[in-house]
Image (cartoon, coloured by chain):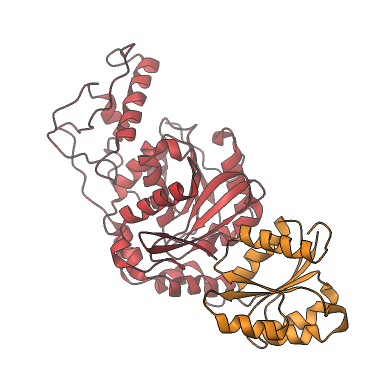
Chain colours: A orange, B red
Amino acid sequence: MARILVAEDERDIRELINFTLMFAGHTVTLAANGEEAVQKVTEANPHLIMMDVRMPKMTGYEACKAIRAMEPFKEVPVVFLTAKGQDEEVDMGRDAGATAYILKPFSPDDLTRRLAELLKEAGVEGG
Amino acid sequence: MTAITFDGDLVHYEAVGRGRPVILLHGMLGSWRTWMTTFTTLMPSFRLYAIDMYGFGDSTKKPDKYTLEHQIALVEDFMREMGLAKAAFVGHDLGAIVAAEYARRYPDRAPRLVLISAPLFDPGDLEHRVPARRVLEARPAVPAPASSDFNAPTVMSPSSSMRKMLAEAMVQRQKVSGTGAPAPAAPAPKPVPIEIPASRPVYPTINPLKELVAGGLEPLLARCFRRGEPDFEKVGLEVARCDPAAVTGMVANFDAGSMLDTFRLLPMPTVFIHGTEDSVIPPPNESTLQYLTADKEQLVLPLLLPNVRHFPMMEDVRFSNLVKDCLEAPDISKIAVKERWVRRTR
């Protein structure tokens, strides 16, 4: 299964995503904000990164740009979590290098399915 | 992260795991987040649905939805929407009330209950109080004249399925005990309206929950966790998300004795888990436990957790596995817990 880096500032949502993905068989690394995601990305060496857009210290966009600037992670899929109706965020995310969006609210089941599709597209075995 | 609407009112819930369905109902200081620590243990074996009741968590804040009736209706709407024919229930304080009342109305849809920090108050009349089933035993298996109010369960109008269940239980008991009028071989008696005899005392309403929540939710939070404990902040966020009117609305018509009768009437395996140091809803006393378990040792299991306050799911690492055992054990009376309360023999 895949290694996934998750950056989400709300603890309970982060935990919910964590055990949802772990239950699906993935290895998960958690970050509480964008800055922490950038710090952890090398060690985590993820197949996919999932980030909330609005986070303290460093937003998802800023973190995405910083990660994309690292050679090993130029092509890693980055998925943003964003609220419905935030079309500006979608445009900004594209500029920052986002691969895809998952709109809130979403169910853990939908999340698992969507990530499986993205991992498959990225050629990750068992995604 | 997941939401559904009923009549335009948003209900937030989380659904995780695979297996038999379990509905998780939070308490007066909670939301779906109450169950975070429980999810990981249960989700490999169960499909868990943690619902934010009206006025709590991320669900709609609409005062006209804050009655116990509306919360019960929410559960029924939710089960219908999810296509659940039946589900076990795990409820915490007010969630335990909703679970019990739902189960009393729809006993076929709630095969098992785990009720945590449930309102097991001693109404002070248990020495004289006549359990509802004993009242039924003394009654003829034919409709009685509608002459007085039914004073037992908290829901004043028993559902037809409940009436049927009670009537069947009465016939079964007569068969087993050989007492009372012989049970008719066939056909089974039709559900009958349940009436109390004119001689049965009318018990006064005792509502300690109303007084408990009258001062707001913050004082209750302070009874659960000391300032500085990690869970103080966590539950504090739940208090901030909750509309206090939802709590007062749900307890407005509570009655301690009727609640105990409702618990006693439940026909499905029911486990009560209570912290011995709970200062929000005190642990049940000996009289209350005797009343709850009389003749129901195979169906009712009270478990008292030493040194645990109002949130066993956050305070006791054994909690999740204990709930798992309670949901899985074919016979709940066989659940081995050292601190199990043992029924006193008279």
Q: Is residue B314 above or below residue B41?
A: below
Q: Tell me residue B311's x, y (percent).
A: 52, 60
- Is residue B220 in view? yes
Residue B225 picture location, percent across and down: 51, 70
The quarter in which the C terminus of chain A is drawn is bottom right
**Image x and y of residue A35, in percent:** 72, 85
Examine the rendered structure and indicate whether residue A90 appears above or below residue B77: below
Instruction: Report the number of numbered marks.
Output: 0
B25 to the left or right of A76: left
Instruction: Find residue B244 and report its image quarter.
Output: bottom left
Q: Residue furthest right?
A: A72
Q: Is residue B157 left or right of residue B346?
A: left
Q: Quadrant of residue A91?
A: bottom right
The residue drawn where x is 40% and y is 48% is B76
Q: Nearer the viewer, residue A105 or A36?
A: A105
Residue at 36 percent of width and 46 percent of height = B101
Image point (44%, 39%), residue name: B109
Along the line of sight, the residue nearer the viewer: B71 or A80: A80
- B268 horizontally vs A3: left or right: left
Q: In terms of depth relative to the viewer, which is nearer, B342 or B108?
A: B108
> Is the residue A85 above or below the residue B165 in the image?
below
Let me know if residue B282 appears in the view: no
Give percent across and percent down for residue B13: 50, 60
Q: Quadrant of the N terminus of chain A?
A: bottom right
